[in-house]
Image (tube, rainbow, N blue to C red):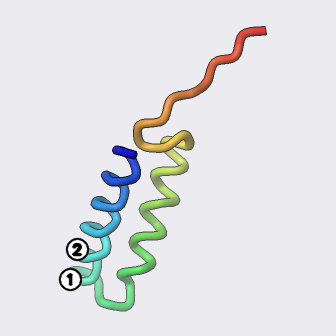
Amino acid sequence: MLGSGLGGLLIGITENLAGGYIGSGMKEVAGFAMIIVVLMIRPFGIFGQRDIERV
């Protein structure tokens, strides 16, 4: 719950900054690019943890 709230806040800030600095057409692209970068770095989410399963 906390991770989704923080993620939404970060995407909103990123889109507004990209709209101001890069251009209004790049707002959506910046949001998607941020999602891809976060998933490449932290595939389990911002606050996610790996499940270690011992067999």
Residue 23, compared with residue 6, is above or below; it is below
Which residue is painted at 30% across and 59% down in the image?
A: 10
Within 10 angstroms of label 2, few (less than 14), some, or many (20 or more) residues? some
Residue 26 image position (x, y, % from top left): 38, 84
Q: Residue furthest right?
A: 55
Residue 51 image position (x, y, % from top left): 61, 24
Residue 32 image position (x, y, % from top left): 48, 69
In the picture of the structure, the residue carrying the numbered disc 2 is 17
Which residue is painted at 25% across and 67% down in the image?
A: 13
**Quarter of the image holding residue 28?**
bottom left
- Give 34 or 11, whichever is nearer the viewer: 11
Residue type at mark 2: give it: Leu
Numbered marks: total: 2
Which residue is painted at 27% across and 83% down in the image?
A: 19
Residue type at mark 1: give it: Gly
Residue 54, compared with residue 27, is above or below; it is above
Label pair 2/1, CB-CB below 8 angstroms: yes
In the picture of the structure, the residue carrying the numbered disc 1 is 20
